[in-house]
Image (cartoon, rainbow, N blue to C red):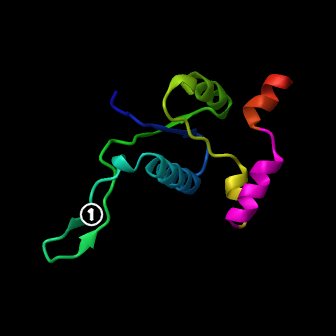
Amino acid sequence: MSLKPVIILDETLPTGLKANFSAVMAMSLGKLRPDLVGADTPTGDGISLAGITTVALPVLGAPAEELPALFDKAAGLPIRLAYMRAAFEARDYADYTARIAAEPWPHTRRRRS
C-alpha cells in the first residue's frame, strides 16, 4: 500500500500557526517513516542540501469541530498523528510532555460527556 499522507488543520488558525503545526506534524511523520525523506542532494557547486519529502504532503483545512471525527475515521490507517494545544502553550519539550501526561486525550473527554 502506498502512503498518501495529508495534514488537516483547524481552518480558522492564523497562517503562522498553520505553518508551525504543519512543520511539526511533518517532522513527526518523517521520524515514523524515514523512508519518506529523500537523500541529501548536492547543488551544482557541491553544497549538500538535506533531503526533503518524496511524497506530496497536502495541508487542508476543516472546521475545528469536525477534526475529532476525522481523526476517529482514520483509526484504521497505518499512521495517525495529532497535535494537542499543549504543544503551542508549552515553553519547552519537558513542559510539553508534562502537559500531555496531565491531560486526558480530548477525544476521550468528548465521548464521556
Pick the residue in front: 12 or 2.
2
The quadrant of the rendering that contains the N terminus is top left
Amino acid type assigned to the residue bearing label 1 in the image: Asp
Q: Which residue is the extreme one toward the right?
A: 113
Q: Is residue 99 magenta?
A: yes
Position of 22 with respect to 46 (left or right) is right
Percent across and percent down for residue 67 are 62, 31
Residue 6: x and y in percent read 45, 37
Neighbourhood count class around disc 1 (C-alpha, 10 Å): few under 14, some 14–19, many 20 upward: few
Residue at image coords 58%, 54%: 17
At x 79%, y 23%, the residue is 111
Magenta stretch secondary structure, dominant: helix
Residue plotted at (34% across, 52% down): 37
Above or below, 41 against 25 in this view is below
Q: Is residue 14 left or right of residue 19?
A: right
The quadrant where residue 71 appears: top right
Task: Give whichever of 75, 18 is nearer the camera.
Answer: 75
In the displayed structure, would residue 113 be above or below residue 55? Answer: above
Q: Which residue is mark 1?
A: 40
Residue 70 in the image, given as x and y percentages of width and height: 58, 26
The count of marks equals 1
Q: Along the horizontal axis of the image, is 77 left or right of 50?
A: right
Q: Which residues are magenta?
A: 92-104
Q: Percent from the top left, x then y, of residue 16?
A: 55, 57
For this view, does 5 lie left or right of residue 48? right
Instruction: Based on the picture, tell me whether residue 12 belongs to the magenta stretch.
Output: no
Residue at left offset 39%, top offset 42%: 57
